[in-house]
Image: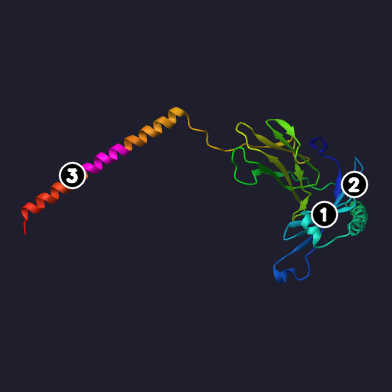
Amino acid sequence: MAGGRGIPLALLAVLTLQGVGAVKVGNTIHQAEFQQRIESLQQEDGEFQQSFNADEVFHVDLQKQETTWRLPEFGTFTTFEAQGALQNAAVGKQNLEIMMERSNRSQGTIVPPEVTVFPKRRVEMGDPNVLICYVDKFWPSVISITWLRNGQEVTDGVLETVFYPREDNSFRKFSYLPFIPTRGDYYDCRVQHWGLATALLKHWEPQVPLPASESTETLVCALGLAVGIVGIIVGTILIIKAMKMNSARNQQDPF
């Protein structure tokens, strides 16, 4: 990807629609569409998706011409005909050509991504977990995200979302890597984008306390025992002093 810097690219801006009555109930439905073309490679691509309160409900795979639900359960409550998205894509291509002509086929400003890596839940050694690579605020929507474990690329189980448009027409994207935390393993999320001179590696490794050695455990036990003995001695002395003071007070004031 980095080698594609300077490649002319045109992008039809993301279209965002707010559902009827959304303001009244505090919920928002977004329908986002975009078409893009890499001029030098004569490649075209696009996306159609619908979200509810910024969470994806479904997107349409324009190549396979089918609707893909973010969760399979969503498809049991409603349907969406992929043909509608394909018709919108055809219109988008026409509009894209018009916009390119009006802009004299100039290239938009390339914005490099921000990358964050974090686990889905608290990390415990040997407990299956998921690493999440969150790639945010980049433009255009041409990007490569790969995972490395101990420096070696890993693909098993990797899942990647579609592009999620932001209000400023930049994009965000997630990549998920299932893994079993093992002491000594480390991971990198590698991101390649035209806005980056070289591939960006975001490092992550489990942050867990090292097991105490036997000598350390022995020292801790010895210190604990010593503190306990000192406490008993000090307590005994204080009790004896208190008894003597009470006895002396009774002798001075028998009544």
User: Which mark is on residue 44?
Assistant: 2
Query: Toward the viewer: 120 or 124?
Result: 124
Q: Amino acid at mark 1?
A: His
**Residue 209 showing in the rendered view:** yes
Label 3 environment density (alpha carbons within 10 Å; few <14, some 14–19, many ≥20): few
Identify the magenta region: 228-237
Front disc: 3 or 2: 3
Tag 1 residue:
59
* Quadrant assignment, res 81: bottom right
Q: Secondary structure at mark 2?
A: strand
In percent of width and height, residue 118 lies at: 64, 44
Measuring 80% from the left and 56% from the top, which residue is drawn there?
58
Q: Amino acid at mark 3?
A: Ile
User: Which mark is on residue 240?
Assistant: 3
The magenta stretch spans residue 133: no
Query: Toward the viewer: 229 or 119?
Result: 229
In percent of width and height, residue 241 lies at: 17, 45
Q: Quadrant of the N terminus?
A: top right
Label 2 environment density (alpha carbons within 10 Å; few <14, some 14–19, many ≥20): some
Query: Toward the viewer: 155 or 33?
Result: 155
Dominant secondary structure (helix, strand or loop) of the stretch shown in magenta: helix
**231 with respect to 134 (left or right):** left
Q: Quadrant of the C terminus?
A: bottom left
Query: Toward the viewer: 82 or 241?
Result: 241
The magenta stretch spans residue 229: yes
- Tell me the distance, in whole angstroms, between the alpha carbons under discs 3 and 2: 92 Å
Q: Secondary structure at mark 3?
A: helix
